[in-house]
């Protein structure tokens, strides 16, 4: 059972502007139309656990970009649009119990997405791998990737790749 983060941040550690904007990600130079390793990452996960705010952002894209089951963490959502049947489910409750429930259903390797969601998993020391791609921009304010935690959590640096002479993509695994 492993839980993975795969995310892009600004140099100052934001994953979106304060209004949830992601335009700064669309400005990344990418003449070869690279996926920057996303397909390889996606092949290693069984399902996605996503915060409600990220889910609502993805709905605005107009296409559903996932080919794996998506579990939406929320205490406020009660139902999903009909178009989401068979693609996504609402979940909540204790994160350790949630992971056990998903494991029983065969979902062992989870992609954890959304700032507050990642922070909640980190607070429970439930993240095993983080792949963080730093975009060379300062946003000054926004939705932070990291927040307060009540204990130190050590990671091992695995590798850092420079992509398109622009992005710094670093992989870390939990040092237990
Ligand atoms: N740069 C990137 O690569 C990247 C990647 C992903 C997302 N984003 C952006 O980040 C922003 C969203 O991040 P965010 O930090 O605002 O929010 P988020 O983590 O996507 O969603 C937070 C919400 O998830 C629910 N939640 C989280 N933990 C929970 C738990 N343990 N139990 C029950 N519900 C839980 C709560 O929903 P309720 O309020 O309904 O209870 C909470 O308000 C969006 O703008 C998105 O586009 C960027």
Image: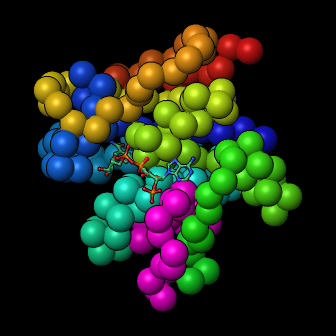
Q: Is residue 109 visible?
A: no
In the image, is residue 86 above or below residue 111?
below
Q: How many marks?
A: 0
> Residue 117: horizontal and vertical position, in percent?
49, 43
Residue furthest to the bottom: 82
Q: Quadrant of residue 70?
A: bottom right
Residue depicted at 34% across the width and 70% down the height: 59
Which residue is depicted at the point 65% across and 20% down?
174
Of the pair 49 and 42, the residue shown nearer to us:
49
The image quadrant where one finds the N terminus is top right
Q: Residue at x 41, y 27 (%)?
A: 146
- Percent x, y for residue 76? 47, 65
Would residue 125 appear left or right of 75 to someone viewing this image?
right
Q: Residue at x 41, y 40 (%)?
A: 115
Q: Is residue 69 above or below residue 94?
A: below
Q: Most prominent secondary structure in the magenta stretch?
A: loop
Q: Residue furthest right?
A: 104
Where in the figure is residue 74, as x and y percent of width and height? Answer: 51, 60
x, y percentage for residue 49? 57, 53
Which of the 4 image quadrants contains residue 144?
top left
For residue 1, side relative to residue 132 (left or right):
right
Quadrant of the drawing holding the C terminus: top right
Q: Nearer the viewer, residue 149 or 170?
A: 149
Residue 126, by quadrant, is: top right
Magenta-colored stretch includes residue 19: no
Horizontally, residue 150 falls left or right of residue 101, namely left
Q: Return the residue nearer the eye: 19 or 132.
A: 19
Q: Is residue 48 above or below residue 130?
A: below
Residue 71 within the magenta-colored segment of the rendering: yes
Q: Which residues are magenta?
A: 64-84
């Amino acid at each position: 059972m492993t839980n993975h983060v795969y995310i892009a941040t600004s140099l100052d550690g934001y994953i979106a502007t304060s209004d949830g904007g992601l335009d700064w990600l669309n400005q990344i130079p990418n003449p070869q139309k690279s996926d920057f390793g996303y397909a390889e990452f996606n092949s290693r996960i069984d399902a996605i656990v996503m915060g409600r705010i990220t889910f609502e952002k993805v709905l605005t894209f107009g296409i559903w970009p996932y080919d794996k089951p998506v579990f939406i963490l929320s205490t406020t959502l009660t139902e999903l649009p009909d178009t989401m049947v068979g693609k996504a489910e609402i979940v909540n409750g204790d994160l350790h119990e949630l992971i056990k429930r998903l494991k029983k259903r065969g979902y062992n390797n989870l992609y954890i997405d959304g700032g507050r969601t990642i922070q909640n998993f980190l607070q429970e020391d439930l993240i095993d791998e983080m792949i963080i791609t730093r975009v060379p921009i300062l946003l000054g304010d926004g939705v932070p990737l990291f927040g307060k935690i009540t204990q130190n959590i050590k990671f091992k640096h695995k590798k850092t790749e420079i992509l398109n002479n622009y992005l710094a993509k670093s992989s870390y695994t939990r040092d237990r």
